[in-house]
Image: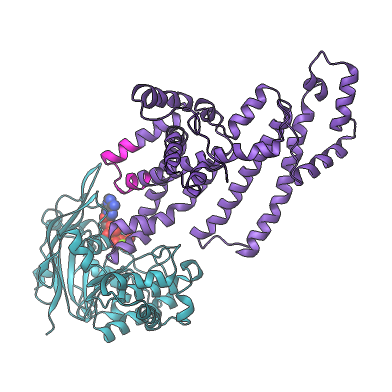
Chain colours: A purple, B cyan
Amino acid sequence: MLSYSVKRLLMLVPVLLGMTIIVFAIIHAIPGNPALTILGTKATPEAIHNLNQSLGLDQPLYVQYFTYLKNILSGHLGTSIQDNTSIASEIWPHLAATIELSFVAMVIAVVVGINAGIISAWKQNSVFDYAAMIIALIGVSMPIFWLGLLEQWAFSVKLNWLPSIGRTDIITTVQPITNLYLIDTLLEGQFAQFWMVVRHLILPAIALATIPTAIIARMTRSSMLEVLKSDYIRTAKAKGEHMFWIVYKYALKNAFIPILTVIGLQTGLLLGGAILTETIFGWPGIGLYVYNAIQYRDYPVIQSGILVISFIFVMVNFITDLLYGLFDPRIKYR
Amino acid sequence: MSETILEVKGLKTSFFTDDGEVPAVDGINFSVNEGEILGIVGESGCGKSVTSLSIMGLLPSPPGKIVGGQILYKGEDISHAKESRMRKLRGNDIAMIFQEPMTSLNPVFTIGEQLTEAIRLHNHLPKKELESRAEELLKMVGLPRARELLKEYPHELSGGMRQRVMIAIAMSCDPKVLIADEPTTALDVTIQAQILDLMAKLNRETHTAIILITHDLGVVAQVCKRVVVMYAGKVVEEGDVRDIFNHPSHPYTEGLIRSIPDLYSKKEKLYTIKGSVPKPGSIKQGCLFAPRCDYVMDKCWTNAPELVGDSHKSRCFLHQEQA
Ligand SMILES: Nc1ncnc2c1ncn2[C@@H]1O[C@H](COP(=O)(O)OP(=O)(O)OP(=O)(O)O)[C@@H](O)[C@H]1O
Ligand SMILES: [Mg+2]
């Protein structure tokens, strides 16, 4: 298992290198001169020449790439064109906001999705089963921006129960330690702030959780149905085991590999910045960060944002892969 | 004479499918005495598995349902017992081994975890003793390297070893009755003989009554004293194994005996009973075996014979007339 993890980790190196090449190529694939794009059409040739030199754009491509690689390896992601801030220091707070939101959304999706799927399979063809599967079908086909707007209209505007925008109130600033506000507020003992952060999380997390919940529920149901029909479940019944434990202790473990796969994929997708949800809820995450950068053609930020998002996607898949072995001893790590 | 521990009285089990009611088991009677091995024989599809699942209360339901008769365990009718009552009996009083050793063990739990489950459920042994009991059980069913086996997974074991593990699981709580549904069908011949020997040995040592279900009369002859022959959801003959082999009093049983391969016979071709088991419920009147019978008479097509006799019963006009 350990040697497999190391091997699998080494295999990530070419994947990550390929990723940097693609991200690097994005900038160079933009038609025309990047300096011209950055400075605008009214720039003087002099200014363009200077910028080219300072960006290293007059060097051969492979030299530029190695400079770029060296920079990201030492943590230099460049500066934003918009406001000259260091991208490296800006990206973590945004990423943390996305991680916090995605984490809460995935917890909701996993808990609700798996349980709904299990009960649907256990009580196949019951009213619960039909209701859950119809809701799941609506869930996967629901346009999320529309669901988000609906939530805001109902719970913020009409009922005035929950805030609809941002991570915090405008008047409150959370002292960042980890930038994960749920943790920061607790570390500082600011329980009122903690509650405020929770309240801000609820609506966007539900919107974000909708599709993963529905997908996980459907996958759990079909996987469990398969398992519950199997001979070894009949063996467990023949031992006198209670159906509840057969379902939750045994069958779930048997059914878990495909469920884990969708959980991994969905987590990767959420962490990749749920641009729509973050825009609607004014959530200062990586999705919104890149979205704004796109509007300003802030190429260094776009480039770094894509790099970080792909990096996370690769890592989530790597972790999912390692987890498979926990659930199925037949998966050989060689 | 020892006491009856399990008695099946007029059991009827049907499947309610889109094509209507399928009477898979149609009013069967038999009883099992304490500590004996009773054989139940019949071709594929005659309702053997449905009978055993009915006793265990493990019919796939829907569509399966017990629609009539009684299953008496120590005098208590368990045919419609509550699920909580059945859970107490299953594994502890009545245990079962299934036809499919390759798929009957859970692939993602260790042998040890699966072996100790029933003991944990019914006996509440402390953890230390649980492990030594599990080891003891594996040794009892003749598996070597018991200690290591406990930590292994089913896919690391051969079919024969898995069936031994299944037997160990079934025996783990010292059941009064063990239902073995074709325990050797999926195994090759040498392993078959070993498993049968093992079951006979366990029966002698633990005094657990065994219902040995098979489609092979040869298997029955090896280990059983009494045998019930089933055909199309009904009992057609019942009695002492030796009586039945020497004087089969139903053409179906006779056919089964004649189709046992005989090493010493010079005959080129083995006897086969022509045709196959009718679909349950497809024959509306007369003897269910009539279409396949070598001795069929006129009245066999219109009247259904009853099961008659004392210690050796049969369901055939031919033999009833002779008597
Ligand atoms: N789930 C089911 N749905 C509908 N009919 C069924 C079902 N299971 C069994 N049957 C019917 O019950 C009959 C008896 O099946 P059973 O499994 O008891 O046969 P068997 O004697 O155990 O045969 P085998 O030697 O192949 O195991 C079958 O012919 C089939 O028509
Ligand atoms: Mg069967």
Residue furthest top as drawn: A42
Residue A212, image x, y percentages: 46, 39
Residue B295, image x, y percentages: 20, 64
Residue B141 appearing in the image? yes
Image position of B21 with respect to B144: above or below: above
Residue B118, image x, y percentages: 31, 70
Image position of A105 with respect to B58: above or below: above
Image position of A328 (left or right of B101): right
Which residue is at the front of the view, B213 or B130? B130
Q: Quadrant of residue B255?
A: bottom left
Task: Please give the name of the residue rendered at 54% of the width and 38% of the height, measured from the top-left corner.
Answer: A270
User: Total number of numbered labels?
Assistant: 0
Q: Quadrant of residue B72?
A: bottom left
Which residue is at the front of the view, B228 or B203? B203
| Residue B91 sits inside the magenta stretch | no
| Residue A123 sits inside the magenta stretch | yes
Image position of A334 (left or right of B205): right
Q: Quadrant of residue B51?
A: bottom left
Residue B275 appearing in the image? no
Image position of A170 with respect to A7: above or below: above
Task: Please give the name of the residue rendered at 51% of the width and 41% of the height, measured from the top-left corner.
Answer: A181
Task: Please give the name of the residue rendered at 76% of the width and 39% of the height, measured from the top-left corner.
Answer: A21
Q: Magenta residues?
A: A117-132
Which quadrant is the N terminus of chain B positioned in? bottom left
Which quadrant is the C terminus of chain B positioned in? bottom left
Task: Tell me the quadrant of ligand 2.
Answer: bottom left
Image position of B122 with respect to B133: above or below: above
Which residue is at the front of the view, B75 or A262? A262
Magenta stretch: dominant SS? helix
